């Protein structure tokens, strides 16, 4: 992503990117470019996004940009980052400015920082890791302040002890007699040349103090370096342990939350399945009840309709029987009237008593009874003949199925065939 290039229309973007590539030192910069476009933003001028061939080419462009120091010309080139990485980078830069660290940069969508030249570079993984680093830095500041105060107090104590020692030695030397070497031998000169002696002593003391101070400073610097290295290694180990422990706690919390969510989902699914089963069972029970009720209703309707049909049939049969009885009674009355009229015509009798007596004696009544018996007997004979004929037909059909060509009938069967009334068939 390139910032600081003014907008001159979409057609001029390629030429501006080409000019920038030539500035960086590439002879044919457009061979490394796949596509170019302006980012949609409220910033003016809008930044340009350049899609290069691969990561090695991108690393070359960034390297030459830093080598040529084009930010002095208000041209800024950086990696195009997604929104979460960009937010993390801004927070990391604000923290680095506050802590006065050397630099913060990005490489392949990863954020790096360095405290100073002597310390190694470190990588920021995510927002939680950044919070952890901020906490550890704050704790280190507090620890450093307490250590500096303790060292200052120790230095003050050491200086006081040195001054007291020096004063005691001076007092002891002043009390002792001084021996000066002459040609004739040694003699005491306690009062002679005291000023010179004091100067010499002071100079010697100062030299010794300087040597001691230099040695102490060297020792302190060496101790400091050792302590710093040890503290850094220990702090790194502590930080790693803390980070691992915090990660474990976070993972446990995540797992607990995930388990809770899973359990909730399982319970919800089980509840849904139970509800579905209940609804299905209730539907089945309802359907059974409905079917039973419908069957009962249908049975009732069928029974009622059958009862009605039976009642109708009974009524019809009763009516027929009544009509037949009435017709028979009417026929009998007509026959009686006809017979009465015949008796009147024949015998000239007008009395009813005589007519009834004559009716009993008359042969017409006997004839009617005889005719009725003959009719019934004839009907029965016809039925028997029809049944025999049907049996014979069935036998013939069976023989035809069995590929029998000829049928032999007895003499009685032939007579029955001849005597039967064929008009019914």
Image (cartoon, rainbow, N blue to C red):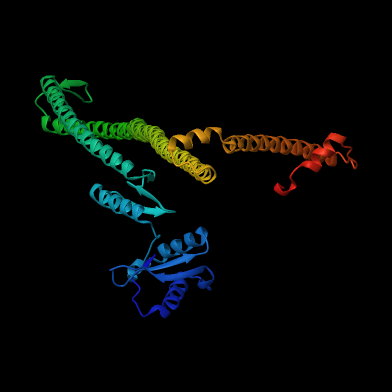
Left or right side of 131 for 178: left
* Residue drawn at point x = 44 percent, y = 67 percent: 50
Give x and y (percent) for residue 112: 38, 49
Residue at screen point 66% across, 36% down = 374
Count of picture labels: 0
List x then y, in percent, for residue 394: 77, 38
In this view, the residue in front, 105 or 380, is 380
Q: Residue furthest front?
A: 348
The quadrant in which the N terminus is found is bottom left
Depth check, front residue: 209 or 228: 228
Identify whether 90 is placed above or below 381. Answer: below
From this viewpoint, is residue 233 visible?
A: no
Q: Quadrant of residue 389?
A: top right
- Residue 178 visible (yes or no): yes
**The one of 315 and 223 positioned closer to us in this rendering:** 315
In the image: residue 63, left or right of residue 216: right
């Amino acid at each position: 992503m390139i910032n600081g290039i003014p907008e001159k229309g979409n057609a001029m973007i390629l030429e501006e990117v080409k000019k920038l590539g030539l500035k960086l030192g590439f002879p044919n910069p457009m061979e490394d470019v796949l596509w170019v476009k302006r980012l949609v933003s409220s910033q003016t001028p809008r930044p340009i996004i350049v899609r290069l061939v691969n990561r090695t080419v991108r690393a070359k462009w960034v390297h030459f940009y830093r080598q040529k120091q084009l930010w002095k010309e208000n041209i800024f080139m950086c990696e195009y980052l997604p929104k979460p990485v960009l937010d993390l980078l801004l927070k990391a830069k604000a923290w680095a400015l506050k802590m006065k660290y050397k630099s913060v940069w990005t490489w392949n969508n990863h954020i790096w920082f360095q405290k100073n030249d002597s310390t190694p570079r470190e990588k920021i993984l995510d927002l939680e890791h950044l919070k952890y680093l901020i906490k550890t830095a704050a704790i280190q500041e507090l620890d450093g302040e307490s250590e500096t105060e303790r060292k200052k107090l120790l230095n003050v104590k050491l200086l006081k002890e040195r001054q007291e020692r020096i004063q005691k030695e001076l007092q002891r030397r002043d009390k002792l007699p001084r021996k000066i070497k002459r040609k004739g031998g040694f003699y005491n000169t306690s009062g002679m040349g005291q000023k010179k002696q004091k100067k010499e002593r002071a100079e010697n003391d100062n030299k010794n103090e300087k040597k001691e101070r230099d040695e102490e400073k060297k020792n302190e610097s060496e101790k400091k370096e050792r302590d710093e290295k040890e503290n850094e290694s220990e702090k790194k180990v502590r930080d790693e342990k803390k980070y691992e422990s915090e990660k474990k706690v976070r993972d446990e919390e995540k797992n607990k939350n995930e388990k809770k969510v899973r359990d909730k989902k399982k319970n919800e699914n089980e509840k849904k399945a139970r509800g579905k089963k209940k609804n299905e069972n209730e539907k089945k029970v309802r359907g059974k009840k409905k079917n039973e009720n419908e069957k009962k209703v249908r049975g009732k309707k069928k029974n009622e309709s059958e009862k009605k049909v039976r009642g109708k049939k009974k009524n019809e049969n009763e009516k027929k029987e009544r009509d037949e009885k009435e017709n028979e009674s009417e026929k009998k009355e007509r026959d009686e009237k006809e017979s009465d009229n015949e008796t009147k015509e024949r015998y000239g009798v007008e009395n009813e008593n005589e007519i009834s007596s004559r009716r009993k004696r008359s042969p017409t009544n006997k004839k009617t009874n005889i005719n009725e018996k003959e009719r019934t007997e004839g009907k029965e004979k016809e039925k028997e003949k029809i049944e025999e004929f049907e049996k014979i037909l069935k036998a013939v059909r069976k023989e035809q199925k069995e590929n029998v060509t000829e049928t032999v009938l007895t003499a009685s069967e032939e007579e029955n065939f001849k005597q039967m009334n064929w008009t019914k068939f």
